[in-house]
Image: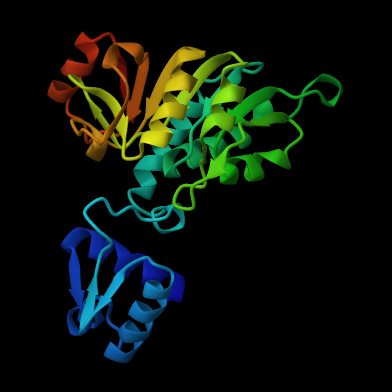
């Protein structure tokens, strides 16, 4: 097991349990206690956990793993969702993409579409507006995409740009489709995220778009997060995995949302 994989497993265990002891973590990962102690010390130096006597605890009640440690959670479901969302996009569209693991997979799915591989005379086939640095860097090397980055202050957990600079750019553009990854989507309360700065940017993307698509795995449905983005009625399409039952989908459909389970 590589160090990166081990750290990811440790952090996910920590989020799940709230506290880890050295011996228990070593047994769970099949490594020595000495290795876990070193891992805890190094993760504490990066402020990804708090070291305690004999173990570690997570940072506060609203702990959020950095994006690089969330990429393998429900990876198969996210890839299926990404492929389905990418198929909704037509050549020539202006597409807004928020940051997150699912939207990163969507960006990769768009890059893999053969009909988006090149335009007439080398002109861009798709315009992507994003506040996510990692998405912009992945797509910027592809000449078939015109990439517009919002500007703003970067959040290290999600690589997203937020703040007044991002607001100013989004206020000057229009989108065909806004694609949002979210932390919660409840039929009664709408879509939401943990961070109010991200909610503000996401709300603007919704307001500037003709169509709003929410792309999220089923574990985030029926869930409310701290900062509300917009009401359910503002969402046109929800793309999620088969973990959302037909009965649970009814609440979204009654609000006018087209639900696609993949």
Give the quarter of the figure containing the C terminus: top left
Judged from this view, the residue extending furthest toward the right is: 121
Position of residue 133 relative to residue 224, above or below, is below
Position of residue 72 relative to residue 113, above or below, is below
Residue sitting at 72 percent across and 38 percent down?
Answer: 142
Q: In this view, does 91 lie to the left or right of 198?
A: right
Position of residue 195 relative to residue 126, above or below, is below
Residue 254 visible in image: yes
Residue sitting at 44 percent across and 42 percent down?
Answer: 100
Q: Is residue 127 left or right of residue 96?
A: right
Position of residue 27 relative to residue 137, above or below, is below
Q: Position of residue 188 (x, y in %)?
A: 17, 19
Q: Where is residue 236 in the image (x, y as percent from the top left)?
A: 37, 13
Q: Where is residue 64 in the image (x, y as percent from the top left)?
A: 33, 52
Foreground residue among 137 and 86: 137
Foreground residue among 69 and 168: 168
Residue sitting at 64 percent across and 18 percent down?
Answer: 91
Q: Please tell me how many numbered marks the rendered image carries.
A: 0
Which quarter of the picture shows residue 46? bottom left
């Amino acid at each position: 097991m590589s160090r990166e994989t081990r750290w990811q497993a440790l952090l996910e265990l920590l989020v799940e349990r709230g506290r880890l002891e050295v011996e228990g973590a070593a047994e769970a990962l099949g490594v020595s206690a000495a290795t876990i102690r070193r891992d805890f010390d190094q993760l504490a130096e990066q402020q990804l956990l708090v070291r305690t006597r004999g173990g570690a605890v997570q940072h506060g009640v609203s702990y959020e793993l950095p994006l690089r440690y969330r990429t393998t959670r429900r990876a198969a479901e996210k890839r299926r969702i990404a492929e389905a969302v990418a198929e909704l996009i037509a050549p020539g569209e202006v597409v807004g993409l928020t940051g997150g693991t699912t939207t990163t997979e969507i960006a990769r799915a768009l890059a893999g579409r053969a009909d988006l591989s090149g335009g007439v005379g080398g002109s861009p086939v798709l315009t992507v507006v994003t506040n996510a640095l990692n998405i912009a860097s992945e797509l910027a090397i592809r000449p078939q995409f015109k990439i517009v980055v919002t500007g703003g202050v970067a959040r290290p957990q999600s690589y997203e740009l937020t703040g007044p600079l991002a607001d100013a750019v989004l206020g000057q553009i229009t989108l065909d489709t806004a694609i949002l990854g979210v932390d919660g989507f409840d039929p009664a309360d709408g879509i939401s995220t943990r961070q109010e700065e991200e909610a503000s940017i996401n709300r603007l993307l919704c307001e500037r778009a003709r169509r709003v698509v929410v792309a999220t795995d089923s574990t985030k449905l029926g869930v409310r997060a701290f900062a509300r983005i917009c009401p359910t009625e503002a969402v046109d399409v929800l793309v999620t995995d088969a973990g959302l039952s037909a009965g649970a989908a009814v609440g979204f459909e009654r609000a006018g949302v087209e639900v696609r389970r993949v």
